[in-house]
Image (cartoon, grey):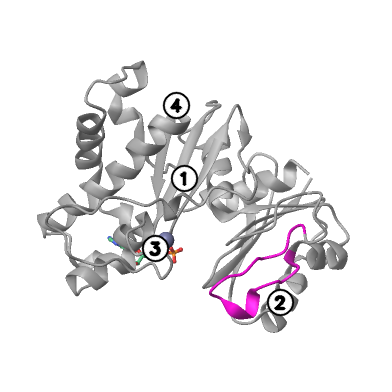
Amino acid sequence: MLYGALEAGGTKMICAVGDEKGNIIDEVTIPTTVPNETIPEIIRYFKGKDIEALGIACFGPLDLDKSSPTYGNILKTPKLAWTGLEIYSVLKDELEVPVNIDTDVAGSLLGEATWGSAKGISDALYITIGTGIGGGILANGEILHGMLHPELGHMILSRHESDSFEGICPFHKNCFEGLASGPSIEARWGKPAEELSDNTEVWELESFYIAQALTNIILTICPKKIILGGGVMKQEQLFPLIRKKVLSNLNDYISTKELEDIDNYIVLADLGGKQGIMGALKLAYEC
Ligand code: ADP
Ligand code: ZN
């Protein structure tokens, strides 16, 4: 049987068809412009593909309250043209198949938990550090939603004593995204993050913020695996720095077999950028 997967991002829409084993059989990328242009292209792609169901891993915030009349709509977003878009119901009505929607990061989490580095693990955390910072939480084998869905990229962090950069989040300034996202690195150091590989000061500071956020999350939800993805995490020198700082922050307050094996506890996403679209496929299969 074939399933449809849509990874809906702020710059591009990845549409794919695949099977229940996570094999992607066909894939296209459509630029995200305005809904009137982009949505018909998505519909055109999936129509006639004979899919059983569609999974959508979408940028947020999203209304994921199944009892809400606006379930599956995109909520207030800086991508103004997309605010209020009924992405779930429009695609469901047009394609006439069951649809399952969740956040983009929940999709990546699901991909990694099904086929990647959190396979078989019931409690896991996925964080992407790219243009923005977002995270998904798997708790007792289920994606955690709560009253909305986690927005851990906006966790307030303490500034490093040597850091005078204000932070770029228009809502909070010194939140995780405001201090540690790709654009915040670029704004602080005057160059895109990918051009700063050799500047050790950059990665010391970046790992300070990531480790601070991870420590807070470890102490709150106790994940058994932490998976990091997104453009900034291509700087793999961050991993040993983050692991060391997390252990130092915890200061032996807790000890678990996962923390003892920290190299296998805080890890890079395993599916090489395919975790989002594969997770969307899993969302379809779970319909
Ligand atoms: P998006 O978040 O838009 O889906 P990415 O995850 O690729 O896309 O994130 C883009 C951000 O990641 C940009 O701020 C960019 O500077 C940064 N980035 C991309 N590649 C690298 C790299 N190799 N090293 C460090 N930062 C990178
Ligand atoms: Zn913020």
Real-space Cα separation, disc 4 to disc 3, in angstroms: 29 Å
Is the residue at mark 3 in contact range of ligand 2, meaning its CB lies under 8 Å from it?
yes
Q: Name the residue under label 3.
A: 172
Q: Which mark is residue 41?
A: 2
- Mark 3 belongs to which amino acid? His
Q: How crowded is mark 1: few (under 14 residues within 10 Å), some or many (20 or more)?
A: some
Q: Earlier in the sequence, mark 1 or mark 2?
A: 2
Q: Earlier in the sequence, mark 1 or mark 3?
A: 3
**In the rendering, at what x and y percent does residue 231 appear?**
36, 59
Ligand 2 falls in quadrant: bottom left
Query: Which segment is the magenta one?
Result: 71-87
Real-space Cα separation, disc 3 to disc 2, in angstroms: 36 Å
Above/below status of 271 relative to 9: above
Q: Name the residue under label 4.
A: 224
Secondary structure of residue under mark 4: loop
Q: Earlier in the sequence, mark 2 or mark 4?
A: 2
From the viewer's side, name the closer residue of 37 and 88.
88
Q: Is the C terminus in the top left, top right, bottom left or bottom right quadrant?
A: top right
- Mark 2 belongs to which amino acid? Glu
Q: Earlier in the sequence, mark 4 or mark 1?
A: 4
Q: Mark 1 points at which residue?
A: 271
- Mark 4 belongs to which amino acid? Lys
- Mark 1 belongs to which amino acid? Leu
Q: Which of marks 4 and 3 is nearer the N terminus?
A: 3
Real-space Cα separation, disc 4 to disc 1, in angstroms: 19 Å
In which quadrant of the rendered view does residue 165 lie? Answer: bottom left
